[in-house]
Amino acid sequence: MAGGDVVPFESPPELAVDFHLSNLGRTVRGMGVPQGVSLIVGGGFHGKSTLLEALQFGCYDKVPGDGREFVVSVGDAVKIRAEDGRSVTEVNISPFINNLPFGRDTSSFTSKDASGSTSQATNIIEAMEMGATCFFIDEDTCATNFMIRDEKMMKLVAKNKEPITPFVQKVRSLYTEFGISTILVIGGSGDYFDVADHVIMMDCYRCHDVTSRAKAIAAENPLRPPAVPGFGGTMPRCLVGGAMRTEGKVVTRSRSTVQWGDVELDLSGLEQVASVGQTEAISQWMAVLSEGGTAGTPPALLAEAVAAVSRQVDAGGLEVLSPGQFHGGLTRPRGIEVAAAISRLRVERHLVQK
């Protein structure tokens, strides 16, 4: 890319790393974001979300000339967002949400119309269930009450009346207890300075390491209350494949929509699904899984069931999803997105806690 409005990406010196690319016979220098909790801050329209969007597709290889060939993330990194109205089946969201009115249990939370906060909590727990090691989060697509709770609100609404433990109090324990890093775009709350390992500022599309300045600011007014010491328990779920079966047709209508018999499966919250070909493969993957779970067969863990089909695809290619059909338009999805699609399917009792 070239032109007067194009700003070449340059790493802050503090985060610069070199990679030798043996196949290309060259060494490239770029920014390496370490493990831990990293913030991307800066004013509006200065490139924060643009950088994060490039990173969230770093789990895929790119064709030459794409412009993001050297933007690489760990293969199991997951973009997390709020998703009002999504379906949730038996997810333990108690690490984030507890003490609901009327004593409603959140250790096995089920809803056909989840709120912003409960859906974002669900998305985190489900990604953990599938072994994610990095979260990408942009405050623009988050539930505000899930991300922060300021001192004035804490004074007005007593702690025992607020069921939500905000993400700022859990993000460190995600890393220290589970090894899950977080890269967070944040422009509206300095509370995250207290829990961050690294702070990157975007200024006119240029990166600057401002960690020391952010930590000095945090020291002047420490986070209150401090981060919660423990994350809390999680519970894996088992897949009852037979409960997903449908007598109707399964049709991929777009990148974000699958018609599953009489049920419309909305995948718009899965931002890392990159093509219709992936969505078609996801629907066929689900169809294979729906043939399992017959009467008398103990259900398998969701992660294990998805991984079993993944091994078949590794051995025989995507054709194993629809033998003899020779579709030609399938693109390999990640198992994380397959499980996420299953979790959003609006059917009864297809997922049960172990």
Image: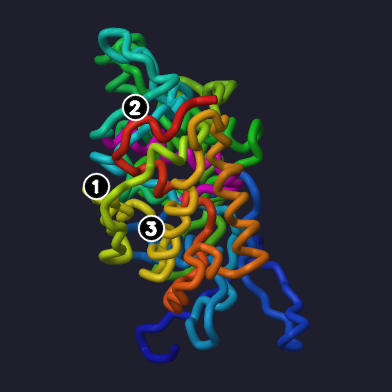
Q: Quadrant of the N terminus?
A: bottom left
- Residue at the spot x=57%, y=44% of the render? 305
Instruction: Tell me which corner region of the image, top left, top right, bottom left or bottom right, holds residue 96.
Output: top left
Q: Are marks 2 and 1 in contact (CB under 8 Å)?
A: no
Instruction: Give the magenta-colored segment's residue range.
Output: 115-136
Tell me the mark number nearer the camera, choosing from 2 and 1: 1
Residue receiving disc 1: 263
Instruction: Tell me which corner region of the image, top left, top right, bottom left or bottom right, holds residue 71.
Output: bottom right
Residue receiving disc 3: 271
Whether residue 217 sits left or right of residue 42 in the image: it is right
How far apart marks 2 and 3 lie (CA) works out to 23 Å
How far apart marks 3 and 1 lie (CA) works out to 21 Å
Residue receiving disc 2: 110
Q: Position of residue 99 (x, y in %)?
A: 36, 12
Tell me the mark number nearer the camera, choosing from 2 and 3: 2
Instruction: Tell me which corner region of the image, top left, top right, bottom left or bottom right, holds residue 109.
Output: top left
Q: In this rendering, does residue 39 appear at all?
A: no
How far apart marks 2 and 1 lie (CA) works out to 18 Å
The local crowd at label 3, few if under 14, some if 14 to 19, many if 20 or more residues have their Cα within 10 Å, is some
- Earlier in the chain: of badge 3 and badge 1, it is 1
Tell me the mark number nearer the camera, choosing from 3 and 1: 1
- Residue at the spot x=48%, y=82% of the render? 66
- Earlier in the chain: of badge 2 and badge 1, it is 2
The secondary structure type at the circle numbered 1 is: strand
Relative to 325, does residue 208 appear above or below in the rendering?
above
Specify whether residue 122 is painted magenta.
Answer: yes
Q: Position of residue 304 (x, y in %)?
A: 61, 42
Whether residue 56 sits left or right of residue 212 in the image: it is left
- Residue at the spot x=39%, y=91% of the render? 3
